[in-house]
Image (cartoon, rainbow, N blue to C red):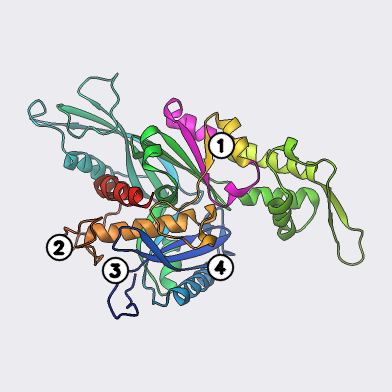
Amino acid sequence: MAKRKNTLTEEIPTIVVGLDIGTTKIATIIGYISSDGKIEVLGHGKAESTGVQHGLIYNLNRTIDGINQSVSIAKNRADCEVTNVYVGVAGRHINSSEYRHVMLRKNGREEVIKQEEIDKMTEDLKTISVGVGEKIIDVIPQKFFIDNNTEREVIDPVGELGERIVGFFQLITGNESEIRKIIKCVEEASLIPSEIILEPLASSMVCLTQEEKKQGVVLVDIGGGTTDVAIYMDGNPVFTKVIPFGGNVITKDISSVCQITEEIAEKLKIHHGTCVVEKSNQNNFITIPQFQQSDPIKISEHYLAKIIFSRVQQDILDNVKRAIDESGYSRKIMSIVLTGGGATLRHIKELAQYTLQKPTRIGIPDIGFSALPPELKHPMYATGLGLLKYGTILNYQKGNVEGFEDSGTVKYTHSGEKDKPSKSIFKQFKKYISDLLDNISEKTE
C-alpha cells in the first residue's frame, strides 16, 4: 500500500497491491479505486516462479527473488513505492471439511435473525481445534435450517424468525508451516502482508458476474500447479476446493512421453496443443531439432492431443467433477467459468462443457475495472487482479480510501474509526461485497 501525487499535486486515493505467488509466475498488480467507482491499474509486473511447486514454496530464496523482480517492475511502471500487499494462498496443503453448528435463540418467535448472530456462529468456529500443524484460514457458511424444518434449506437466514438455527459451514484449513513460508517470503522482500486470501475467492471477484453468483456458478481456476474450485449460490461462496494438479502436469507428461525438455513441451502445448483429439490435425507433424547432430524428433499433432486430453480429463476435469458432486450443489449449478492460465488451452471450454454437462465460458478478469492494459485481459491474471480488487474494496470499507465524498457513485460514510482487519474473506463478502461490489460492477458494465 502507498500513496502518490498526480501531476496537479493532488493526492489520489490509497494505492493497493495484489501479489500472486504462483507455481509458474509471480505477479504484482498495483491500483486504486477512482472517484467514479472503477478500479484503475497503475502498474504491473511478472517474474518467473522457480521456487514453487503445486502451490507450495520449497525454495524461499528463489521465491523472494521472484517477488522482488515482480514488485520492482510493477512499482517502476506505477512510479510509487510499495509496502503492504494482499497475498493469495492455495496449494495442495489446503483442505476443506464440513462442520455443523447450532445456535438457540431466546426470542426467536418475536425477533428476526440478525447478521450479527450469523457472524457469531462463523466466529465461534474459528476457535475450534483442528489437526496438529493445521491452521483455519476461513470459515464459509454453506446452508442453514431453521427450527425443525429440515426440508427447507436456507442460504441466508437473516430476516427470518426462528428459535433454533442449524448451520453447516465449510472450514478451510491449511498447513501452518506453509502459510508461514508465504509470510516469511513476503517479509524478506521488505513487504508487509496485509491479509492472506484464498485464491479462488479472489479470482471470483473479477471473473464472475453478480447474476452468475446468484443463479449458481462454479469458478475453475486452472493454474500451473493447482486447480482451484469455488462454488457460488444465491450470491455467496458456499464451497471451495484446491485440486493439486494444474497445467504443469500436462507439460511434464508431454516432456516425459516425447523425451523432450519441459521448455519445449510447454511451447508445444501452447502453440500446437488441443484438449480434443478430434480437433487435431492428423497430418501435421512438428519437427524438433536435436543437439549434437542427432536426428530431429517428429511429433504428430494427433499424438500430442492424446497426451494433453488424457491429463486434462483425468487429472483436472474429472477431479473438478468429483469436487462438484462432493459439494452437494451439483443439481443447482447453472454454469461453469474457467479461468487461470490453463483456461487458454485450445478447446478446453468444449471439453469442460462435455465433462461437466453445464454451459461453460472462459472468464476474463475485467469485472469492476476501468480500461485494463491489454496484457492483463488474460485469465492468468485472475488471481492477481482479484487480490487487488479485494484490497481496494477492503480499504474503502475500512475508511482508508480517500476522494469518494462527491463521487456520485459510491458514498463515503466511514465514521473515522480504524476497524480491525477481518481474517475471514467471507465476512467481508457478506457485509460489504454484496452492496459495494454490486455498485462497482454494475457501473463498469
Tell me: residue 249, above or below residue 68.
Answer: above
Q: What residue is pinned by disc 3?
A: 13
What amino acid is at disc 3? Pro
341 part of magenta stretch: yes
Q: What residue is pinned by disc 2?
A: 417
User: Mark 4 or mark 2: which comes first in sequence?
Assistant: 4
Q: CA distance from mark 3 to mark 2?
A: 18 Å
Task: Look at the image and give the residue range highlighted in magenta.
Answer: 318-347
Q: CA distance from mark 1 to mark 3?
A: 42 Å
What amino acid is at disc 4? Ala
Q: Report if residue 179 is visible in the image.
A: no
**Residue in the picture at 85% in, 43% down:** 283
User: Mark 1 or mark 4: which comes first in sequence?
Assistant: 4
Answer yes or no: do the residues labelled 1 and 3 have beta carbons within 8 Å? Answer: no
User: Mark 1 or mark 2: which comes first in sequence?
Assistant: 1
Along the line of sight, the residue nearer the viewer: 263 or 59: 263
